[in-house]
Amino acid sequence: MLEIQNLTLHADGRSLIKDLSLVVPGDGITALIGPSGCGKTSVLKWMAGILPDAFQTHGTALLDGKPISLPHRGLCYQPQSDALFPWLTIAENAAMGLEIAGLPRRIALAQVTALFAPFGLAGCEAQFPAQLSGGMRQRAAFLRTIVQDSRLVLLDEPFSALDAVTRLRMQDWLLSRLSDRPRGVLLVTHDLHEATGIADRILVMAANPGRIIAEIDVPGQPGARTEAILADLRETLKTLLLEQTP
Ligand SMILES: Nc1ncnc2c1ncn2[C@@H]1O[C@H](COP(=O)(O)OP(=O)(O)OP(=O)(O)O)[C@@H](O)[C@H]1O
Ligand SMILES: [Mg+2]
């Protein structure tokens, strides 16, 4: 379980995040939603230990109750931009996280390329990022992140560039992966269908300064909820978000 306590972020003399505390359980998906610019990416970058020097930060991160310094190898992060290396092939990019974790390159490549077909990337192994569409690059970045053996996974809008059908496939794939290998996921998304459909809990953020204004436990099993539950919850979330939108 990851706990963030009293996170405060300042940049350019502005208070971007104030006293934000949240918990990501070690099992299941916690969705983080909130208006554009409220600070979701900044919070994830802080957790990943890659926030630029322009930010002044204050806050504590605990993993299973113990304070940790960031970055921490127990936390794996997929940035909002795909951040693929342009000089590496798609297979090499996807294998990069496993290689950094110490797996021999041949084994890392074999593990990721076995997933190229279900990810709709078959035949792209030897291509370079510039030769692929945004949605294909995003799936390669998701693959690079999700194959790693970290305790917690931080995903910043991982499916935002995907068409509706591919997005549903990747959501199903993620749920099935998590049922085989339970771990905690913090999923930033603007898609209320995605948040209500696959998350166990939803955290709602407000802006100016960024903070959590609601925590909702979603009833029913992810991926198997009735349309009545989903529609009701989407309405609740829409109302909360509208109240935050000028
Ligand atoms: N390097 C930076 N220096 C100063 N301010 C920054 C920097 N990066 C982001 N910000 C500011 O931090 C605020 C939060 O940005 P952030 O990208 O975290 O929002 P977000 O909630 O992820 O938005 P979106 O939903 O559009 O991705 C914004 O006001 C933005 O201008
Ligand atoms: Mg963002």
Image: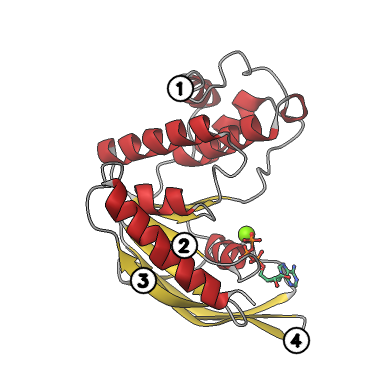
Element on which disc 4 rests? loop
> Quick check: is the Cβ at mark 4 less than 8 Å away from ligand 1?
no
Disc 2 versus disc 1: distance between alpha carbons? 26 Å
For disc 2, the neighbor class at 10 Å (few under 14, some 14 to 19, many from 20) is: many
Task: Please state if 155 lies on the left or on the right of 224 as rendered.
Answer: right
Which of labels 1 and 4 is toward the front?
1
Indicate the amino acid at tag 2: Leu
Disc 3 versus disc 1: distance between alpha carbons? 33 Å
Q: Are marks 3 and 1 in contact (CB under 8 Å)?
A: no
Question: According to the image, label 2 marks what residue?
Answer: 32
Residue 32 in picture, x, y percent from top left: 47, 62
Disc 4 versus disc 3: distance between alpha carbons? 29 Å
Of the two numbered discs 3 and 1 on the same chain, state the one appearing first in sequence. 1
For disc 4, the neighbor class at 10 Å (few under 14, some 14 to 19, many from 20) is: few
Residue 31 in picture, x, y percent from top left: 42, 58
Disc 1 versus disc 4: distance between alpha carbons? 46 Å
Q: In which quadrant of this rendering is ligand 1 seen?
A: bottom right
Indicate the amino acid at tag 1: Pro
For image coordinates 34% across by 40% down, the residue present is 175
Q: Are marks 2 and 1 in contact (CB under 8 Å)?
A: no
Residue 215 circle label: 3
Residue 14 in picture, x, y percent from top left: 71, 84
Question: According to the image, label 1 marks what residue?
Answer: 118
Disc 4 versus disc 2: distance between alpha carbons? 25 Å
Question: According to the image, label 4 marks what residue?
Answer: 13
Indicate the amino acid at tag 4: Gly
Element on which disc 3 rests? strand
